[in-house]
Amino acid sequence: MSEERSLNFIEEIVEDDISAGKHGGRVHTRFPPEPNGYLHIGHAKSICLNFGLAKKYGGKTNLRFDDTNPVTEDTEYVESIKEDVRWLGFEWANELYASDYFDLLYAFALNLVRQGLAYVDDSTPEEIATQKGTPTEPGTPNQYRSRSIEENVQLFEDMKAGKYPDGAKVLRAKVDLASPNMHMRDPIMYRIKHAKHHRTGDKWCIYPMYDFAHGQSDAIEEITHSICTLEFVPHRPLYEWFIDKLELFPSRQYEFARLNLNYTVMSKRKLLQLVNEGFVEGWDDPRMPTISGLRRRGYTPASVREFCERIGVAKRENMIDVSLLEFCIREDLNKTAWRRMAVLDPVKLVITNYPEGQTETLHGENNPEVEGGEGGRDIPFSRELWIEREDFMEVPPKKFFRLGVGLSVRLKNAYIITGESVVKDAEGNITEIHCTYIPESKSGSDTSGINVKGTIHWVSVPHARTAEIRLYDRLFRVEDPSNEDGDFKEYINPDSLKIITGFIEEDLTTAIPGKGYQFIRKGYFTLDKYSTADKLVFNRTVTLKDGWVKK
RNA sequence: UGCCUGAUAGUAUAAUGGUAGUACGACGGUUUUUGGUACCGUUUGUCUUGGUUCGAAUCCAGGUCGGGCAACCA
């Protein structure tokens, strides 16, 4: 078969570890989202990496929610995350929560206090920030740093007991205030938050910081390869410091570059703004780079996985061209989507030599990419058809392989026609196109001997049904909205959604939710989640590649 | 002007001291009852300056440029 793909740097590390017998050759990864937003395509990269590694090397992957901040987290997000991971086609070995470890984490903290490696600090956030110094100047210790172990134990227990209001005290690790790594300058381990947690309710009023929960959670679960994104590189020494001082399982963290896609934004904070401020319909708006948005848009799990495979994994900052994502979905849908006809911008075509009142039933295959066409459907044909306005030109340029007066084209799955004349309204707009057809040119039994260069799609006027069709374009007008001057929302593409009513062929009224359809020559479409039998709504997943660029 | 990171076609990603390759994009062609698909071809690259070596994208040193780090966020 094909050559084996070369390994990415993390796979190399894993293979080296396996051959060195590290952890007995065991591979255990985890995907650790915070349930404070919906997953996006960047998370898909991480999911595919973590689950992919385990699958490839016979290991396991945990789904662990890093739910250490109750004020931003919610079970709605937990549910959406689980749905998205499953939709992508992955199964986790264990569903876990950092909050499962709150008792353990508290014991770890007490342990460090007793070792003299943590202390309770009464400073305000501002004071702590000042005392941390700057990247070029060392921090300065305050009077709380030298509290006795006994006092710290008592104070920390009092914090847990709810004796202090939010923000009154924090527990800090006593590491090194002069470290060139800001994360080592006595990082905060616990803070007071009298907030209800989505899982532990009111049990706790102190919550561990990410830095005091994430690494230990990995260690508790005996994760062999803790994979995260580049911004956590400076956290690694602290992660290892805690593991060392607490004598935990030595999980090792490896960092890769997060995915950036052009013409969109990829931060939960920004996506949340788009949702909250009404720039999109919700987290699953088909213009959003969220997994749920892609799903509603008509992307398939296989196409997203293929995309994640093709973009690769490395350590350098990257900006992936959205055309690669589009390539992946077209590649998948080309092989699976059933072909149907829909006219998005209609103009009436009258076949003057076709008997008035006559109707016939033609046949079209479901998918020409599949041997045998994968079945087919009946298509009603009559004297009056809707065709695409752009498929006719009064004054056609050279190499225009469509309809014009005196120009011939094939009607897909039907006859060859020749343009004869046009009818216009008072403003000069074309309201009807008249043509004649060649009865011997019927698809499948063509004895006319005529060859035409172009084929156009159509829908019979008396048989046509209507549907709302939503045409999506990129959400932003610039490649990197986050990197422009001012608010990123100023760069939203005003034409990112165009809603039209189109004519569809009868068969499309029984379209299956979740299935991709190719509207011939127009693109791939899928039923929107709000589509009903009374009012069909189709989302355009992606256009077909257009090789005809007119000047 | 501290620490950590990184730098290969337009965009990504290989080459692990021995012919710089692949994909997407772009461009051109063949086929085609979708200007789609498929197939074929063309185009463009090792940040820079030195050093080591028979030989450097790869190793070493300096520089340049990019990204990250000073949340009681993750």
Image (cartoon, coloured by chain):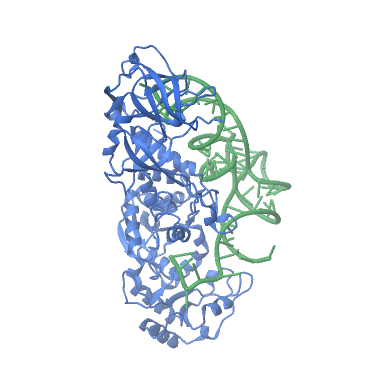
Name the residue at 34% across, 57% down: A80
Closer to the camera in the image, A67 or A551: A551
Q: Is residue A23 visible?
A: yes
Q: Say which colour chain A has.
A: blue
**Residue A369 seen anywhere in this rendered image of the structure:** no
At horizontal 41% and vertical 66% (from top left) the residue drawn is A214
Q: How many marks?
A: 0
The residue under the point 30% across, 26% down is A364
Q: Name the spot of residue A336 as percent of width and height, x first.
A: 33, 35
Horizontal and vertical percent position of residue A307: 43, 44
**Residue A409 picture quarter:** top left
Colour chain B is painted in? green
Q: Using the rendered view, name the quadrant where residue A379 is placed.
A: top left
Q: Quadrant of residue A74?
A: bottom left
Q: Is residue B32 above or below residue A281?
A: above
**Vertically, is A79 above or below A509?**
below
